[in-house]
Image: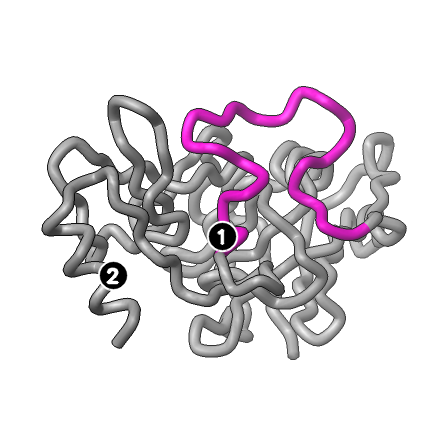
Amino acid sequence: MNRLLSILALGALGCGAVLLASCNAGSAAGTSRYLSAYGPTAQPPRSPDDPGAALPDDVSYWSGDKVSGSAAITIDLRQQKAFFYKGGTLVGVSRISTGKEGNDTPAGTYRVTEKSKDHRSNLYGIVRNKATGEVVNDDADSRTAVIPPGCEFVGAPMWNFLRFNGGIGMHTGYLPGYAASHGCVRMPHKMSEKFFENARIGTPVTVVR
């Protein structure tokens, strides 16, 4: 009810009103951290430090630059890790954040069907004031979001996007330490780069529970 009243108030007052974000993944305070590390005009991180990590990353590594062989990826939902193989040899492990309850990342066997380095979501993102850049909804769904006059929807950045199951793919994203996404597989930026560079269209992707 409170969210409905907030939406109605936003429509009546215009873009200057603040829309109360739904309680969503990544925030202990009850507001979304969906785009906290990547603003609406963000560019891919240039620093070796990953802005999307909420916890120190002592898990991820890559040792596959000099290894040859056919690529394959396994995503383990229980462990919240992704594994990259070349010719059957494990060459990389990445921390991940997969789909939260209700937006689960489906288990199954898939293949990479699209590579898009500077991809942005057409479904999920933010609503912001065009003039000021103020974010009035930091967890917007383009299919249902209220977009008042003077505002715009901006799709969430999904750098190094590897699509493997309909709208679901692997990409750079915020990592709170648990399953928190809308279904995609979020990764540290440095690992999303390695997976992107070494996977091809057709690379097998296996999602296990």
Residue 199, given in percent of the width and then of the height, sits at 62, 41
Residue 6 marker: 2
- The image's colour scheme reads one colour
Q: Is residue 7 magenta?
A: no
Q: Give the structural element (helix, strand or loop) at label 2.
A: helix
The residue closer to the viewer here, 110 or 150, is 150
Q: Is residue 53 magenta?
A: yes
Establish if 153 lies above or below 42.
below
Q: Is residue 15 left or right of residue 82?
A: left
Please identify the quarter of the rendering in which residue 151 is found: top left
The residue closer to the viewer here, 37 or 72, is 37
The C terminus appears in which quarter of the rendering?
Answer: bottom right
Residue 187, given in percent of the width and then of the height, sits at 65, 48
At horizontal 50% and vertical 77% (from top left) the residue drawn is 101
Residue type at mark 1: give it: Gly
Give the residues in magenta.
32-55
